[in-house]
Image (tube, grey):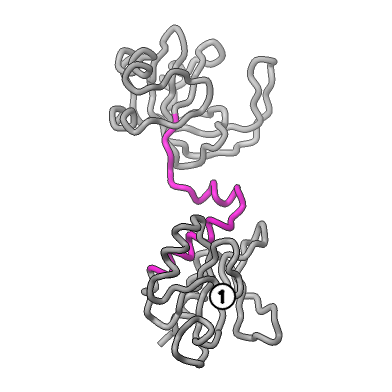
Amino acid sequence: MQSFREQLSAYIKEKYKASPEYLWGRFPGYAVYRHGDNQKWFALVMDVPGNKLGLETEELVDIVNVKIADPFLADILARQEGFFRGYHIRKGNWISISLRGEVEFDVISRWLEESYVTTASAKTKQARRPAKEWIIPANPKYYDVEAAFSKENEIDWKQGKGIKTGDTVFLYVAAPVSAILYKCRVTKTDIPFRFDNGDVHMTSLMKIKLLKRYKPEQFTFDVLSERYGVNAVRGPRGIPESLSEALK
């Protein structure tokens, strides 16, 4: 039967594609796991004497050190059974979690994910965030989106900053329509494309697939402003929860 330490090592290798690094000859049981891009540590597995953690034993205890984004949360966790202040790395909200069995593996994996995201590069954080909803503008002066969707249900669109594959975008068609007309799913992003005519500048495209149409009178600019507090759509923006519910 695998120990929690062995199970954790296999889990990290499968999910995060990271292998253990043994950096200290004096401590052969210390294994570092780091990100492939920014090389930051997201986990440090150690075997330390239990009395160093405040336990009533001098036997070696396997622990994993992980980083928590919220210092208040790290403080709360360190008070729970099987959790300790970060051993030897107390700064930066690190905590140690026992691998003896007091803490269930799914709980350990949850805080491992927290540490992975907390220490990740901006690119990795963006890739791992949950799907999001956006309102994006569509100016008929530059592109006839209505004609495009009459021919195809998936079209190319200017890449919006922060938008990733799997996100939902609602197209707000500017004057003379001035209303949200389309709900779309982003199916691909970061398609290389260069265009600049002085008014429109693009360096990449994304593909959006039509999911739903709205009547022009449903979500007009006045409705968006008066009911949902959306007073401008000049670029990609998030959606208030009340509007999100209405659009469903």
Q: Is residue 224 above or below residue 102?
A: above
* Residue 124, placed above or below residue 50: above
Considering depth in this image, is 183 or 134 the residue closer to the camera?
134
- Pick out the residue farthest to the top: 176
Q: In this picture, which residue range is highlighted in magenta?
A: 107-134
| SS class, disc 1 | loop
Under mark 1, the amino acid is: Tyr
Label 1 neighbourhood size at 10 Å, few (<14), some (14-19), many (20+)? some
Asked if residue 113 is among those painted magenta in the image, a careful observer would answer yes
In percent of width and height, residue 53 lies at 50, 81
Foreground residue among 184 and 155: 184
25 is higher (above) or lower (below) than 32: below
Q: Is residue 180 above or below residue 76?
A: above
Q: Is residue 99 magenta?
A: no
**Residue at image location 34% in from the left, 16% down from the top:** 226
Q: Position of residue 51 (x, y in %)?
A: 50, 87
Residue marked by disc 1? 87
Q: Nearer the viewer, residue 38 or 80?
A: 80
Q: Magenta stretch: dominant SS?
A: helix
Quadrant placement of the C terminus: top left
Corner quadrant of residue 213: top left
Determine whether, in the image, residue 161 is placed left or right of residue 229: right
